[in-house]
Amino acid sequence: MTFLPYLAPPVFVLLWSSAFVGAKFGLPHAEPLTFLAIRFALVTVLFAFIARALSAPWPTSWRQTGHIAVVGALVQGVYLGGVFVAIHRGVPASLAALIVGLQPILTALLAGRLLGERTSARQWLGLGLGLAGVAVVLGERMEASPIDRIGLATCVAGLIAMSLGTLHQKRFASSMNVATGSAVQNITAAALTFIGALALEDLRVEWVPAFSLSLAWLTVVVSIGAFSLLMVMIRLGEAVKVVSLFYMVPPTTALLAWILFDERIGLFGACGIAVTALGVALVVRRPKDTGLP
């Protein structure tokens, strides 16, 4: 247990970043919404078993269930749907991670408008740096080869949905039990993506080893493993610092994508990722924070 407080944060970042890479491994063998519908259904079953094992309480009213379902539709269905569609359409995993990595910035700014929370000058500076960093990376990518505009649009839609879902949960569903709430969120996302797959896709799945391993990784290791680490860090008093870890996700994803897919990043791209990470850090870190957790 001595090293657990030091090991949990970097492992959490690595698992979260690997979701973008895992998606790229599996998407050649399944359409994006079909892939997600299967994943969400499996995750629902796993969280239901966890809830049963822990005797966790389920929502006590339809109103509470509805709020949790709205969060699931936004932060699971639309957010991951946008990312998966983007990667399926050829948007590099590192760029997708960078765009949705602006979520803490957008959430902080929307909180100022929707929840009456004050937006500081430091947060506005973080927004400027974050957007500038994404613009640099996007410009470099566009010079190398055109990037699908629909894929970029779905990524931005995912970013907005994640931010709105985070605020909705903070306002209406902050007291939900994590295990049962996650089950409700995932069954909602499963229904949403299945409807989308019926309308837009052919429900094609190639049950080859690459897809099966990708599905297993995203379902068990990312959805359950990252969740378990989150619970451990909360127990160790690291909950506040977890948010600040998200500014490490884009560079970690870029490194993984370079190693596994040879997604090369030029000097300007690397600088853009660093600038964006700094921007997110300015938004999510409290003035008294010093150093990484």
Image: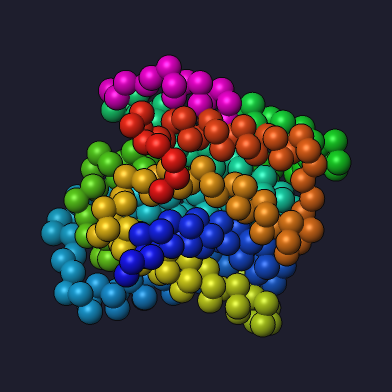
The answer to whether 125 appears left or right of 175 in the picture is: right
The answer to whether 236 appears left or right of 42 in the picture is: left
In magenta segment, residue 124: yes
* Residue 278 higher or lower than 235, as above or below: above
Quadrant assignment, res 5: bottom left
Residue 105 vs residue 148, the one in the foreground: 105
Q: Residue at x 53, y 60 (%)?
A: 14
The answer to whether one can see residue 59 in this image is yes
Extreme top residue here?
121
Quadrant assignment, res 43: bottom left
In magenta segment, residue 136: no
Q: Residue at x 24, y 48 (%)?
A: 173
Residue 43 vs residue 34, the one in the foreground: 43
Extreme left residue here?
60
Q: Residue at x 60, y 72 (%)?
A: 214
The boundaries of the magenta stretch are 116-130
The answer to whether one can see residue 158 in this image is no
Residue 288 vs residue 164, the one in the foreground: 288
Q: Position of residue 262 (x, y in %)?
A: 79, 58
Extreme right residue here?
144
Q: Position of residue 37 (x, y in %)?
A: 50, 66
Question: In what quadrant of the picture does the N terminus appear?
Answer: bottom left
Q: Position of residue 174 (x, y in %)?
A: 23, 47
- Image mark count: 0
Q: Residue at x 43, y 62 (%)?
A: 7
Q: Position of residue 27 (x, y in %)?
A: 67, 65
The answer to whether 241 appears left or right of 255 in the picture is: left
Q: Magenta-highlighted stretch: main secondary structure?
A: helix
* Residue 286 higher or lower than 80, as above or below: above
